[in-house]
Amino acid sequence: MYEKQIRIGTLVNGGASTAEYIRQILPHGFESFTITFWETLGDVDLTKLADEVNEVLDGSDAIISAVSIFGNPLMDHEKARAARDGWVKLVDAAHLFNCDLVSGFTGRIVDRPIEESIPRYAEVFGPIAKRAADKGVRLAFENCDMHGDWNRGDWNIAHNPKAWEMMFDVLPADNVGLEWEPCHQMVNLIDPLPQLRKWVSKVFHVHGKDATILWDVIREYGIGGAKEFVFHRTPGFGDSNWTDIISVLRNAGYTGSIDIEGWHDPVYRDEWEMTGQVHALNYLKRCRGGAYVPNPTTE
């Protein structure tokens, strides 16, 4: 069935409890899981983790769609070096999880304009992309600005289409692309659908996260920070039409996953977190057209 579908899944934290967490939420109907690490891999044993996760998934149709690390590998301090090492280790271990995708932040030279990070980005990720290509692995960079902008920030340069042009020009590798979601564009008042249509060939993975824009607040207070004008939302509660998003993805031949990035919604959070995520799971399944139904073999 799934070769006909875009899978709908969720993000889970990487660590000692990953397999048990997946075991508990798998019956809700999640079809894929992204395993994520913050800044570094810590002391995790990736072989052991893969064995535990694969045991939980055995007998189900669910998969690990990506393994991810979200740090700043472009700097030259201990955590940055650990982040670079994490990218390499995940590239080498992706096959253990039966997946071919490693994702995360590009990093950036802290508080410098994006263009000043481009040479360092190529220096760091050129060899990693080559190593990944040799192993049949793709790299996907998330489009989160992490409260940065073009001129300054701490984490990531891959949040603006101009930056994507520069990144793909300096590192024109077929296995290097984007981990895209509409939310991070909407936070910057970018219309996500035209952007997706333009860049869909470079989208390797999609995070299921939406946003609600308060246009009345913008009209009264602007976007300078006096009043919060936008909220990250779980799909089904935000402004995006995910039927349109999935249609663009499908029309371009996208066959990956949309994995819900939870823990951001201001309403469906804390004890309501999984209620919101399961709502998003079922909503996104409806948006993709429901269950796959084969055509009759004869007219």
Image (tube, rainbow, N blue to C red):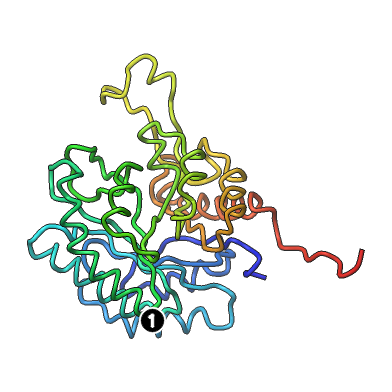
Query: Horizontal placement of 252 versus 65: left or right?
Result: right
Question: Disc count in the image?
Answer: 1
The residue located at (36%, 62%) in the rendering is 176
Q: Looking at the image, which residue sits at the far right?
A: 299
Residue furthest to the left: 77
Viewer-nearest residue: 208 or 199 = 199
> Where is the N terminus found, in terms of image quarters?
bottom right
- Residue 209 sits above or below residue 258 on the image: above
Residue 164, image x, y percentages: 33, 48
Residue that numbered label 1 is attached to: 50
Relative to 108, say whether 48 is above or below: below
Corner quadrant of residue 298: bottom right
Residue 7 position (above or below residue 199): below
Task: Residue 126 in the image: state x and y as whole percent.
Answer: 24, 66
The picture places residue 120, in percent across and down from the top left corner, at: 16, 57
Amino acid at pointer 1? Ala
* Label 1 packing within 10 angstroms: few (<14), some (14-19), many (20+): many
Q: Is residue 245 left or right of residue 223?
A: right
Q: Residue at x 44, y 54 (%)?
A: 207
> Which of the pair 255/29 is nearer the observer?
255
Tell me what residue is drawn at x 38 percent, y 81 percent.
Answer: 50
> In the structure shown, which secondary structural element does the residue marked by tag 1 occupy?
helix
Work out whether residue 87 or residue 116 is closer to the camera in this orientation and state it.
116
**Picture coordinates of residue 2 (x, y %)?**
63, 69
Q: Is residue 274 left or right of residue 59?
A: left
Q: Quadrant of the C terminus?
A: bottom right
